[in-house]
Amino acid sequence: MIDFSSTLPGLVAESPDDPVRSGRLPVGVLLDHLQVGLVVLDEAGHVVGVNHQAREMLELPLTLLQSQPPIDDVVRWQVERGDLRGDVSHILQRVWHHLRETARRGQPHVYTYTTAGGRTLQGTTIAIPGGGWVRAYVDVTRHAQMVRYLRDSEERFRSLTELSADWYWEWDAEGRYTRLEGRLIREYETAEMFLGKCAWDVPALNRPRPEDWAPLREAFAERRVFRRVELQRRLRDGRVVWFSISGMPVYDADGRFTGYRGVGRDITRRKEDEATIQRLAFYDSLTGLFNRRAFVDRLQQAQAASARSGEWAALCFIDLDNFKDINDAYGHAAGDRLLQTVAQRLRDVVRIEDTIGRLGGDEFVVLLEDLHADEEQAAWRAQHVAEKVRAAVETALTIEGHEVQATPSIGITLFRGRDEAVEDILRRADLAMYHSKSAGRNAVRFFDPAMQAAVVARATLQRDLRHALRDGELRLFGQPVVDARAQVVGQEALLRWQHPLRGMVSPADFIPVAEQSGLILPMGQWVLRQACAQLAAWARAGGERAQWSLAVNLSPRQLRQPDFVDTVQAAWREAGADPRRLKLELTESLLLHDIEDTITKMEALAAQGIQFALDDFGTGYSSLAYLKRLPLAQLKIDRSFVRDLLEDPNDAAIARTILQLAKSLEMEVVAEGVETAAQFEALREMGCHLFQGYHFGRPAAL
């Protein structure tokens, strides 16, 4: 063994108390027990020192080392054995180049090679001050094997992603994509769409709303594994594809969360196949409408929905009166064309939420939901839709140069809840359709004769109401509003209809019809113009009436019109009325729809002096937060609280509360429905200053 004490004096402690110098632990023994192989070269490049680990790692023969050979001989011996591969002269040039560079620069040189026996060594050459070098060797065979294993594993992984429809992805701790690898990622050119973004930051056609991403975001926040999350994406070239992603959380060696990794898969073909199966199973192949199976399922869902909402639904059964004649005359192709046209016309006239089906042949069905909680109102709406369907279907069309007209017979039945079997509902609608055919075809009939009569009466009332607008049959009445001394200070305008045959028609009969038919808009404009003309007439006449106000009730549909403010301005300007004498009354139901738009319109008119009153206060669901923002001048206590004011302490308490609330908001209060002197006196004692009711006068023509 070569004694390192003489070859490496710099490695020996110089303290006289050092155990090595004292002989208690020889340097050679110490270095031989290191796990690092050491080879010492003198300034001429001769091997002058080798420890036990170096001889084991390099597998050099002792006979070679004992002669202190030059490094060149050692390199030649290693080349011959196969430890070093390549041209000897070229290898020697490299060795001496690195020796000189380490001596010149004072920086170690690190290199790695594998011996003929398969051992991988990492060597480090260090220049010794005063001349010579130390070459330290570490056996990194296991590390090199692991690196090769990881490299091979990475190559296998890349091969799999290249050959399959799957790809690999990684997220950071914030959920942002940091890695995307796979053949389809390149083919679809999607990497730029995702890198640096979260999955929920990239639009998906099947998850358009932020809440649609809640399950995935919750899984990420809770560090849970998620599987097969399906996403429909539109690529940059316009193609629509389906992806499915699965992922699991990743933690570092200290247990800290570092992100997610997982796989993605293109499931576009599967989705297309599923859609095809869906169409075949649930849709009519000719028209694209629901087939019987799907329609029955939808009808059952409608029953459940109506049971929850309490609203009526309707089933319309449609049969083409002369389809067989058209089919026989022009052929099946013409018949198919007719059926397709009818299907499209049905789509055009019903709401998008309504359901249309084809049961077979020339039989179609339409399911109407959420019609109304009142049966008669629901029937009226169903009749309205059915008439639109009838008018659309009976319109002639041209097929192969021939003008063809197919009229429909339509039967309607109403239902609510789940008490009836689906087949019973279909049977009733089918029977109603046959009543339509018996009535002469091209007609609409209800299963219930009483309901049919009510619908006919309503249709007649709507027709007559149109004539009333045209022929000037409407009248404007007024009911006095008095102060605490019972002196008249204004009127509330009330609409009346003087029918030429039926006499005076109650507003309770014709106002709902006007609301549903849209006639309330021209009627409301007429009332507004008449009221402004009346205000102008009072002003011209002088006296106490010149100071009266006139209140006009607004319909929800009026206030929602975009030109509402302009319409009101035009009415008082054309009449020459003082806008400060005009009061517009709204109900609490008006505040449930687009409150911001309502406030904007009210403020625009209030700026011109027009006052606003909230009618029937206490019966709706007004938010106090909105109430304080509205430019209201008055609250009107609903007559239901006034009627039992003297007998019911609760009604009295409500009236007092409204009066106190109005006072705090600096509003006037009008008590409606005052019918007795006792009610008048009780309200005055509570602090009410304005009153309206039969006790002061019934409505009369203005």
Image (cartoon, rainbow, N blue to C red):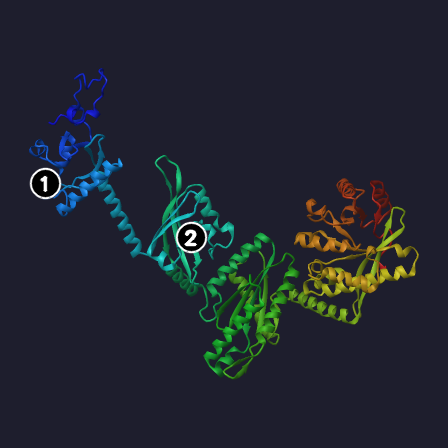
Badge 1 is on which residue? Answer: 77
Farthest residue to the right: give it.
543
Check disc 1: other Cα within 10 Å, few if <14, some if 14-19, many if 20+: some
Question: Rounded to the nearest whole Å, what is the CA distance between mark 2 and mark 1?
Answer: 56 Å
110 and 549: which is toward the camera: 110
- Quadrant of image for the C terminus: bottom right
Q: How many marks?
A: 2
Percent across and percent down for residue 623 are: 68, 46
Check disc 2: other Cα within 10 Å, few if <14, some if 14-19, many if 20+: some
> Is 311 displayed left or right of 170 in the figure?
right
> Is 479 displayed left or right of 138 in the figure?
right
Label annotation for residue 505: none
Percent across and percent down for residue 309 are: 59, 53
526 and 421: which is toward the camera: 526
Percent across and percent down for residue 383 are: 63, 66
Residue type, mark 2 in image = Phe
> Is 632 displayed left or right of 702 in the figure?
left
Percent across and percent down for residue 96 are: 18, 40
Residue type, mark 1 in image = Trp
- Quadrant of image for the N terminus: top left
Q: Tell me the element at label 1.
A: helix
Q: Quadrant of residue 511?
A: bottom right
Label annotation for residue 194: 2
Q: Is residue 27 above or below residue 411?
A: above
> Is 114 displayed left or right of 500 in the figure?
left
